[in-house]
Image (cartoon, grey):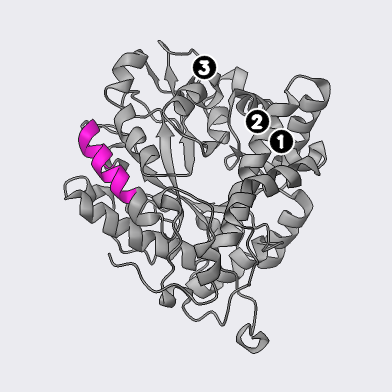
Amino acid sequence: MRRATRLSILAAAVTTMLVAPPALASDVEDEAVGSVTGAVRVEPAAAEDLAVTAAERVAAMTTAQKAATVVMGHIPTADPQQLRAYMEDSAVGGFILMGSNVPGSESALRDVTAALTIDPALPPLLAIDQEGGDVSRLPWDGFPSSVTLKYEDPGASELAFAGRGALVQRAGIGVNFGIVADVTDDSGMFIYRRALGTTPDGGAERVGAAVLGEGAEALSTLKHFPGHGAAPGDSHRGIPQTGMSEAEWRASDAVPFQAGIDAGAPLLMFGHLEYTAVDAAPASLSSTWHDIARDLGFRGIAITDDLGMLQASGIGAYSDPVANAVAAIAAGNDMVLAVLFSDSSTAGRMADGIAAAVESGALPSERLDEAATRVVELRLLLAAQGRGLMPCGDCAAAG
């Protein structure tokens, strides 16, 4: 797919961008803003200053503010006023849009995402599960999905996710939880239709292509690390397990994730999966698996799958959402995600629990600083690149 002309208001920002892998390039199609009259103009930091700026911002935060920054919350409404109040009250660093947050038109969705963005100079990480096909929050997404892409040339995945990323971006959403790097050839597994490959090499080709295609418009997320394909079962209802060794994993299920990392995916979602030969804990709560991800070269944001799924497993050890959030940050996640069983107070309680753990010494302050800095840096990058452009009224009249 050809790279379209940059919006004139972003040209200068993009040329001074943070030096980043291909998935963070910012070519925005002129038509991507649709009927929106304009976009907030944000003066970006110079490329080399983004990391420094993020560290300075985090250093100036209280422990409570840092803790809120590493939480991605959710409430089930498309009412802009309620959503804005939620973001103002919780001060969380991100929000995941589910079906309940998506109104019937793209323009109405832009009102939703604008309401969620309190400060355009430091926008939250707004995310959505827009895989296409079986998992599709945007009903106007008609691009091919993994249901057919797994059988087509990798170029088809690049094209499909280039289009899908543009839809996500023009809705005002910066992050897509859309690239399923799990691999399986078992049509009986729940992840089969959602996976981009039936073999490690086939999955790797399509995952890498999808990241490259989507990266011009949306920040790609690889999921569900270290891979559902080896662990039978649905993590929405339990904790799937496998006895696969790390060496076996590196030669098989790791391959698509490595391809996505090499292609520049800036987020990696950790699944609630137990590879018992590697660690008895679910990967989402395992420091071992986070170390392995960094060993693969991943330098972006590690985020949990929905922590409510741990509660849904019925396992007593995972019944407390706050304890799960603290354990997830301690394990190496930079952001925790809460949807199932959550309400308007859940994200705040998670943040309070994380802050309390730091203040008691149970969670090293350096770990929270590291996580918060990664999140703030990506939020600054969103602002600098103009991703998820927010409506601002008659910007043209403002010059």
Task: Check if mark 2's residue and mark 1's residue have beta carbons within 8 Å.
Answer: yes
Q: Is residue 218 visible?
A: yes
Looking at the picture, which amino acid does disc 1 mark?
A: Met
Is residue 357 positioned above or below 298 on the image? above
* In this rendering, position of residue 255 left or right of residue 11: left
Q: Is residue 134 visible?
A: no
Magenta: main secondary structure: helix
Give the image quarter of residue 160: bottom left
* In this rendering, position of residue 131 left or right of residue 389: left
**Label 1 environment density (alpha carbons within 10 Å; few <14, some 14–19, many ≥20):** many
The one of 183 and 368 positioned closer to us in this rendering: 368
Which residue is the site of mark 3? 281
Which residue is the site of mark 2? 325
Across and down, in percent, residue 381 comes to 58, 54
Which span of residues is magenta-colored? 196-210
**Residue at (56% x, 23% y) in the render:** 285
Across and down, in percent, residue 225 comes to 42, 31
**Residue at (48% x, 63% y) in the render:** 169
Work out how far the residue at label 2 is from the one at label 1, CA to CA, in angstroms.
6 Å
Q: Sequence order check: which comes first, mark 3 or mark 2?
A: 3
> Considering the numbered disc 1 on the image, is that residue within a helix, a strand or a loop?
helix
Work out how far the residue at label 3 is from the one at label 2, CA to CA, in angstroms.
14 Å
Is residue 306 positioned above or below 254 on the image? below
In the picture as drawn, the residue positioned furthest to the top comes out as 277
* In this rendering, position of residue 222 left or right of residue 93: left
Q: Sequence order check: which comes first, mark 1 or mark 3?
A: 3
Task: Check if mark 3's residue and mark 2's residue have beta carbons within 8 Å.
Answer: no
